[in-house]
């Protein structure tokens, strides 16, 4: 049995998961909290009996913990069914709350699709939306932003804290100052920074997603600061201060809050560990893979994420080839998307969209994982180019 | 818009094929020649200008023929 297992391990490489920006592996604290809360937190927190009171305690404690980690008041924070739902509620609720001011939404061109889809619905219902460009590194054009938010009838501005596709950290505080001058509330989609980096100041509405920090899938956070004119875009419902309809998945919420506290406590140390690994990937990919473009801001970036595009390589073929060698990554190439369109983020930056790979690290990623990825990548790309007959072009 | 010296029909091809076709053809044309790439994969709108930037060739314009076929004009500069 034993020798057989070893021989098998030689053939199938051990898996290296490098897609934390989609979903980080469950944090051990989340797992522990989830299991405990499954036994203890199944009752409806709104009922008037012992089991319900226990559930209510768990929910209140989770809210208090998450609020404390984010530095907000517990009554400002609601749990949602995902980061996507939180983003939808943030955008649509911010627009509904200020509909008397006007129907204008200003957003960066590189928002998450959840924000863009909410914007599309707003436009389909007669509102307007202005997408503000970014430069080649994926940095917001602050002059265009400031001019747009100062325009007439702007109800809400939306800015992603850091790009989930290329890692570029956005100038949130400067963008917030422009919004404050214009009297326009700012919504920040902080899904990639919460639990990893300090959350920038100046926003009125914020959203996040637990699976990005090692919490369970299917939990989002929506924070609406006191005094913000925000109105629920959903049919009336009393849960979560009326901000998100339906009962929350309490065991998952408890796990999300516990793991958020743990992730935030380790965030600085993790960033200091992962950032040099990302730096190594950035440098070695350029040095060892011909005709590759590493995209995103080299300095003002997320600590755990790096994206590059390989000329003449089909993105889907590259993902499959990497998967066969045990590497899980994602891609913004059109052939890997259900819509067959290239990533709007790469498009807005004007960078190569085919042969695109996003690598994102997590607390389980080791230096050896990165070393193996870097050792195998040049050969995998070279093989694909040889098969396509594009060597030397 | 001046007429191109050569037209590459990449309609129906998915990226990176139109870019590969351009990379194969352009070096065989004289310096200064203009190639028009017809490509309906939306990724071509991003990837053809990006290829020109990476290779130091000149991206002239995204054009559209009367039947709305997306087309991209590139001039060989070296
Ligand atoms: C920046 C950003 N916003 C929103 C979301 C949506 O979160 P969820 O996957 O929890 O719906 C994601 C993740 O996909 C993200 O990266």
Image (tube, coloured by chain):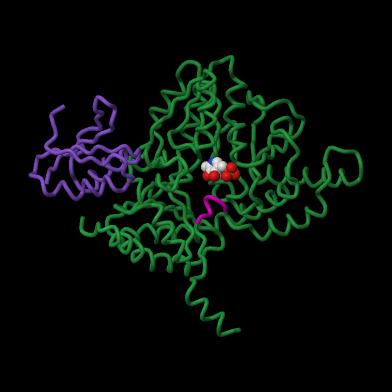
Quarter occupied by residue B18: top left
**Can you give x and y, in whole percent of width and height, for residue A324 in the image?**
45, 64
Out of A278 and A44, give the one closest to the viewer. Answer: A44
**Residue at (78, 53) in percent of width and height:** A37
State the residue in front, B49 or A226.
B49
Q: Specify start and end residues of the magenta stretch as a single range.
A: A19-23
- In the rendered structure, the answer to whether residue B9 lies left or right of residue A13 reads left
Letter of the chain in green: A
Q: In terms of secondary structure, what is the magenta stretch mainly? A: loop
Quadrant housing the C terminus of chain A: bottom left
Whether residue A222 is visible:
yes
Which residue appears at 22% of the width and 39% of the height? B37
Image quadrant occupied by the N terminus of chain A: bottom right
Q: Position of residue A229 (x, y in %)?
A: 63, 23
At horizontal 53% and vertical 81% (from top left) the residue drawn is: A6
Chain in purple, by letter, is B
Q: Is residue A150 magenta?
A: no
Residue drawn at point x = 59 percent, y = 33 percent: A88
A121 and A255: which is toward the camera: A121
Which quarter of the frame holds ligand 1? top right
Q: Is residue B50 left or right of residue A165?
A: left
Residue B46 horizontal/vertical position (percent): 32, 40
* Residue nearest the observer in this picture, A49 or B17: B17
All told, the count of numbered labels is 0
As drawn, A262 above or below A168: below
């Amino acid at each position: 049995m034993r020798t057989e297992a070893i021989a098998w391990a030689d053939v199938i490489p051990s898996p290296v998961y490098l897609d934390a920006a989609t979903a980080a592996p469950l944090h051990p604290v989340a797992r522990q909290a989830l299991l405990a809360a499954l036994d203890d937190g199944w009752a409806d927190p709104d009922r008037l009996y012992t089991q319900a009171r226990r559930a209510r305690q768990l929910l209140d404690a989770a809210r208090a913990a998450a609020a404390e980690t984010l530095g907000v008041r517990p009554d400002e924070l609601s749990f949602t069914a995902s980061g996507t739902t939180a983003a939808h509620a943030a955008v649509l609720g911010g627009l509904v709350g200020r509909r008397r001011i006007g129907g204008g939404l200003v957003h960066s061109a590189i928002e998450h699709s959840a924000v863009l889809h909410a914007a599309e619905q707003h436009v389909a219902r007669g509102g307007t939306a202005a997408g503000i460009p970014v430069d080649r590194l994926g940095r917001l054009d602050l002059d265009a932003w400031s001019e747009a938010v100062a325009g007439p009838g702007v109800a809400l501005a939306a800015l992603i804290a850091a790009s989930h596709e290329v890692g570029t950290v956005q100038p949130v505080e400067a963008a917030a100052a422009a919004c404050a001058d214009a009297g326009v509330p700012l919504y920040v989609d902080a899904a990639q920074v919460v639990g990893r980096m300090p959350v920038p100041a100046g926003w009125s509405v914020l959203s996040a997603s637990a699976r990005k920090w090692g919490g369970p899938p299917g939990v989002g956070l929506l924070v609406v600061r006191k005094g913000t004119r925000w109105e629920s875009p959903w049919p009336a419902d009393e849960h979560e201060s009326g901000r998100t309809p339906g009962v929350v998945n309490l065991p998952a919420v408890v796990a999300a809050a516990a793991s958020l506290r743990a992730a935030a406590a380790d965030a600085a140390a993790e960033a200091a560990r992962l950032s040099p690994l990302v730096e190594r990937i950035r440098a070695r990919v350029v040095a060892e893979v011909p005709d590759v473009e590493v995209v995103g801001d080299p300095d003002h970036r997320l600590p755990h994420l790096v994206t590059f595009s390989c000329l003449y390589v089909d993105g889907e073929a590259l993902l499959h080839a990497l998967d066969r060698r045990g590497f899980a990554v994602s891609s913004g190439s059109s052939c890997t998307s259900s819509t067959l369109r290239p990533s709007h983020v790469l498009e807005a930056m004007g960078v190569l969209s085919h042969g695109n790979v996003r690598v994102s690290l997590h607390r389980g990623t080791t230096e050896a994982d990165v070393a193996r990825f870097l050792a195998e990548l040049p050969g995998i790309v070279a093989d694909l180019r040889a098969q396509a007959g594009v060597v030397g072009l | 818009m001046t007429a191109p010296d050569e037209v590459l029909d990449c309609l129906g091809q998915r990226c990176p094929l139109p870019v590969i076709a351009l990379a194969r053809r352009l070096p065989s044309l004289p310096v200064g020649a203009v190639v028009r790439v017809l490509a309906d994969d939306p990724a071509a709108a991003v990837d053809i200008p990006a290829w020109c930037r990476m290779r130091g060739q000149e991206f002239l314009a995204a054009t559209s023929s009367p039947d709305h076929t997306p087309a991209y004009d590139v001039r060989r500069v070296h």
